[in-house]
Image (tube, grey):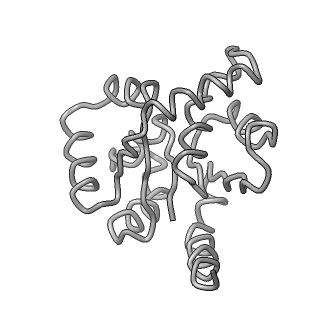
Amino acid sequence: MNITIDTNVIHILIDKEHSDHKIFKLVINNLKKRKIIWVYGGSTYKSELSKICNESYQKFLKELSTGGAFLDLNKDREINKKEKDCYSIKCKTSHFNDAHLIAIIIVGNSEILITMDKSSIKYVKDKKFYSNGFKIPIILKDEKHLKNLNKYISKSKSKSKSK
């Protein structure tokens, strides 16, 4: 199951002292077991990532990448175009500045978005960004939602077996 993780969550995944780190432990465990794969790409996401990536972040991401759980889609051109298309549907504003996440979700076929940015959620859920038949991702933003991660993974696996 592919997931997209907003860069505003990475520090919580890595910083064991962060008050919300325990909540995200389930995400980390599932990434390490490769039950979920964190997909990323595009100029905007990579730029955000480079701005926040210190040595501990790089070590964490390298470990996930080596295990196949942090995957560059290698489709930057396609993601950048999809991001631009999203902004042509809805103009970029201070509230809508995460079209790159929608683009990664679409190109990477992500079933889940993990974000702490409450302002982007209504845009990610907006059907006008997605083609007919594309399943809008489940959004996990707090402990209540993250507790259901294993349930979502199980549902996804049972759907893929029945195909």
Q: Residue at x 39, y 39 (%)?
A: 11
The number of numbered badges drawn on the structure is 0
Q: Is residue 161 left or right of residue 77?
A: right
Q: Looking at the image, is 83 positioned above or below residue 35?
A: above
Q: Position of residue 60 (x, y in %)?
A: 25, 49
Q: Is residue 35 left or right of residue 159?
A: left
Instruction: Please identify the quarter of the rendering in which residue 119 is found.
Output: top right
Q: Is residue 95 above or below residue 66?
A: above
Residue sitting at x 39%, y 60%: 28
Residue pictured at 33% horizontal, 50% vertical = 16
Q: Is residue 14 left or right of residue 109?
A: left
The image shows residue 38, relative to residue 49, as above or below, that is below
At 61% from the left and 83% from the top, the residue drawn is 158
Q: Position of residue 152 (x, y in %)?
A: 62, 70
| Above or below 52: residue 65 | below
* Camera-nearest residue between 133 and 99: 133
Query: Quarter-wise, where is residue 49 in the image?
Result: top left
Could you tell me residue 14's position as x and y percent? Answer: 33, 46
Quadrant of the image for the C terminus? bottom right
Q: Position of residue 154 (x, y in %)?
A: 58, 78
Relative to residue 6, is residue 18 drawn left or right?
Answer: left
